Image (cartoon, helix red, strand yellow):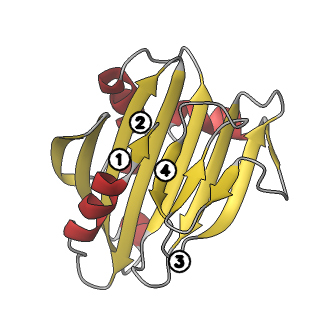
Amino acid sequence: MLRPSSLSILGCLIFAGAHADVRDTERERVLSLLQMKPALSLPKSDWTIQREQRREDESAVYYLLASDRTKLNLSVYIDKSTACSDADNCLKAALSNKSYKDATELTLIASGQFKGATFFLDQPAGLPIRQAHVLAAAYVDGIWFDIHISMAGKERPDLAPLLELLKSVELR
């Protein structure tokens, strides 16, 4: 899910067919904004890019990835921004998204350079599903990294796989 300020930014994003800022090695997938550092790395696994969008001026990029093996969804928003200036304030902005107003069991966490939150959404928008969510934010060298990991099912998903993924994500 995009953070609240991202909803207006989404209108300024354009679809990019090529994945110029995605680099794969045998072990990892690295996502970045214009090949800038820092970049976000995660274990390669079976992630497939479902969507890539970028702001016209190339100052922000959004990636939506999915894993068939783990059934996890991962969205990464990388924004060269002054909308927030540290991980705590970036997380606060992300959590203000109206989509999370019915969140239950919200717990604040920290993982490496990220400040985060875990929560559940039961029957969002009246749908017969339950969702587990991990939001995490970091702010490094003027770049906001906004990560959203989620899983859905008929029963409430376990947070453990989401938290394991977050622990494996690095900024470098």
Query: Is residue 98 visible from the viewing direction of this image?
Result: no
Q: Earlier in the sequence, mark 1 or mark 2?
A: 2
Comparing 54 with 20, the one in front is 20
Query: Between marks 3 and 4, how big is the CA–CA gap?
Result: 14 Å
Query: Between marks 2 and 4, how big is the CA–CA gap?
Result: 21 Å
Q: Is residue 153 left or right of residue 33?
A: left
Residue at 34 percent of width and 81 percent of height: 153
User: For the residues carrying marks 1 and 3, which lies nearer the camera in this image?
Assistant: 3
> What residue does disc 4 label?
41
- Residue type at mark 2 is Ala
- Residue type at mark 3 is Asp
> What residue does disc 2 label?
94
Q: Kindly indicate whether the residue at mark 2 contacts the one at mark 1 (C-beta within 8 angstroms).
A: yes
Report x, y in % for residue 137: 38, 36
Q: Kindly indicate whether the residue at mark 4 contacts the one at mark 2 (C-beta within 8 angstroms).
A: no
Q: Is residue 170 left or right of residue 114?
A: right
> Residue 162 is drawn in which quadrant?
bottom left
Residue at 33 percent of width and 61 percent of height: 165
Disc sitting over residue 121 in the figure = none
Q: Compared with residue 123, is residue 16 higher up or lower down, i.e. above or below? A: above
Say which element carries label 4: strand
- Residue type at mark 1 is Leu
Say which element carries label 1: strand
- Characterize the local packing of mark 4: few (<14), some (14-19) or many (20 or more) Cα atoms within 10 angstroms: many
- Residue type at mark 4 is Ser
Q: Earlier in the sequence, mark 3 or mark 4?
A: 4
Disc sitting over residue 46 in the figure = 3
> What residue does disc 1 label?
135
User: For the residues carrying marks 1 and 2, which lies nearer the camera in this image?
Assistant: 1
Query: Between marks 4 and 1, how big is the CA–CA gap?
Result: 16 Å
Q: Kindly indicate whether the residue at mark 3 contacts the one at mark 2 (C-beta within 8 angstroms).
A: no
